[in-house]
Amino acid sequence: MEEKLQVVCAGHAVVDVLLDTVRPSMLEHDGPLQGATLAAGGDALNEALALRRLGVSVGFLGQLGEDLGGELLLTLLRRAGVNVGAVRRSGRTTLSAVNLLPGGEHRFWSFQSGGNALQADMLDEGMIARAKVFCIGSLMPHSGMDFPGLGEVCRRARAQGVLTAADAVLPPGDYDQNEMTAQLLPVIRQLDWFLPSIGEASVLTGEREPRLAARALQAAGARGVVLKLGARGCLLAAGGRELMVPAYPVPVVDTVGAGDNFVAGFLAGLSFGWSDRQCARLAAAAGALSTTAHGAAGGLKGLEQAMKLMKGSNEDETGNAF
């Protein structure tokens, strides 16, 4: 009997080389680093690994390189208990050098492989149909992703009762806002949940105010929208209701992967059958905990840890802080 999964994540998988505080002057000569770590990254892969730590059964779909990087990522996914039976292997693996800066900020330099240009034919729709939730991590304009095909995959998944979700990431460079939004529309129209950051939503909609940006994305076709607002928490908009969920205060070490852990928390809540608000609270807790250690997988240890953080907060039932 084929495994029934709670969540299937599809999309980006990256080998990250985390470099501790590379300054411009260091690029001119050889020398030591304060620290360096090899880690797994990429939105979909980070989400899948975080979901496993939250106790969710997960499948990963996408393309990994036929190289050492691909073997590393595949091994990490398998060790975590992620179903990788339908992963495609081809080409080279995407690699990012991540400069970790003081205060938890970071800068990325990436080699993008074909695996990050997600295509509909990379996806096992049988696996998706057996899941409660299907998430694309992430939608990136001007990346070569097959947005019409991915939209059709989401449409067919919804027809079988699967909840659909996606995050977003913006390409480097100066692109036309309307053109970027138009590229994503075939998928956005088939989403139960769209979870971009406020920065991404503002670029896609032209609206800087979170509520206006969320309404614009709903008008574009997304049933529900969750905007990541960083230290302010998140805004949830669905079913005619708009709700602010505060962030949880934690000592920040590194923000790499915080958004992916946030998305994983929300997906976990959906797979548990929780209310929208409780999903957003778990998302906020998972995102916050991920920042308490270096790397996307360092801070979030499990569901019990996240629940403890949620229970210790001063928040009323409307989602407003006391």
Image (cartoon, helix red, strand yellow):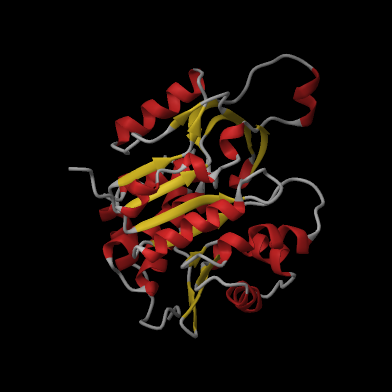
The answer to which image quadrant residue 86 occupies is top left
Judged left or right of residue 193, residue 172 is: right
For this orientation, the residue located farthest to the left is: 1
Asked whether residue 202 is in view, the answer is yes
Residue at 63% from the left image edge and 63% from the top image edge: 185
Q: Residue at x 48, y 70 (%)?
A: 246
Q: Residue at x 33, y 57 (%)?
A: 306
In the image, is residue 250 above or below residue 206? Answer: above
Residue 293: x and y in percent read: 45, 42
In the picture, the quarter occupied by the N terminus is top left
> As drawn, which residue projects farthest toward the top?
30
> Residue 13 versus residue 187: which sits nearer the camera?
187
Q: Nearer the viewer, residue 312 or 186?
A: 186
Nearer-the-camera pick, 65 or 210: 65
In screen coordinates, is 221 left or right of 293?
right
The number of numbered badges drawn on the structure is: 0
Q: Position of residue 269 (x, y in %)?
A: 33, 63
Quadrant of the image occupied by residue 229: bottom right
At which x and y percent is residue 77?
Answer: 37, 33
217 to the left or right of 75: right
Residue closest to the far bottom:
240
Is residue 229 something one can see in this rendering?
Answer: no
Quadrant that contains the C terminus: bottom left
Percent from the top left, x then y, of residue 230?
57, 61
* Figure check: 290 above or below 89: below
Who's the residue at 23% across and 44% down the image?
Answer: 3
